[in-house]
Amino acid sequence: EINESSDQKAAISKSKPTFKNDEPTLPFGAKESDGEKQNLSISISDFVKAADLPNGADDKQGLAALRKALEDRDVAKLLNATQDTLQILSKEGVYLDSLDFELGELKFWRDFGKGKRGKSLSGIVQFSDYEVIEKINVRFRTDTMFKDVVHHFLRQFDGVFTEFNKNASDNDIAAFSNTRTAVTFLILASVAGTFD
């Protein structure tokens, strides 16, 4: 389980993350150290690796990226929300690694990052397992606690991805779109009506 340390819980992020076009880093907020704020920066490649929630001991690069990502409050919140959601879905017998889907063009991700919502984004993903998505949809409609988890995740994802989109290359977006965090977003946004 991903747990925030006391330092991470004390992190302060009063403004949206900002991205530098000339630097592949993601400065997500700040944390306190000896009474002073220190900016935190996460490289785009580390963010993408962390978003896939690496958990195998052999994936040393992924685990190192995850440790770096968890030092930031905003990213840690998103990754924790992803893990919480995946634990709930697993109890429903839904596992991302076995889910069959096809991703749409990158322009849909770009459009989402620029604030577009609704049917113009309906091509972002095509799920083949309609029964699985419907099962999650029923849970979303009938389980208030799960609905809260979904909305919490979507809020966290929206804030982080919007800023990530500003500096990420098309290759970065493509790599991110296949991570567990991104696929979790596609599932939850689908049942929550983000693409309707």
Image (tube, grey):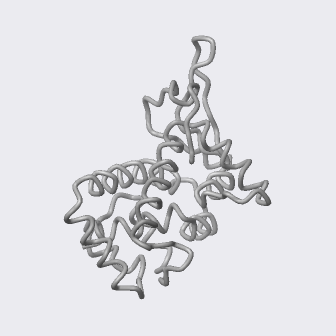
Screen quadrant of the C terminus: bottom left
Q: Residue at x 63, y 12 (%)?
A: 34
Q: Name the foreground residue: 164 vs 99.
A: 99
Q: Name the foreground residue: 64 vs 195.
A: 64
Height in image: 167 above or below 111? Answer: above
- How far from the left and from the top, in percent, is residue 188? 36, 65
Q: How many marks?
A: 0
Q: Residue at x 57, y 48 (%)?
A: 1
- How far from the left and from the top, in percent, is residue 189? 34, 66
In which image quadrant can residue 25 be found?
top right
Q: Name the foreground residue: 88 vs 153.
A: 88
Height in image: 54 above or below 73? Answer: below
Query: Left or right: 64 with respect to 47?
Result: right
Q: Name the foreground residue: 71 vs 54.
A: 54
- How far from the left and from the top, in percent, is residue 193? 25, 68
Residue that lies at the very extreme toward the bottom in this rendered image: 128
Residue that lies at the very extreme toward the top in this rendered image: 35
Query: Left or right: 58 with respect to 160?
Result: right
Residue that lies at the very extreme toward the left in this rendered image: 142
- How far from the left and from the top, in percent, is residue 168? 58, 58
Q: Residue at x 68, y 52 (%)?
A: 46
Q: Residue at x 57, y 71 (%)?
A: 178
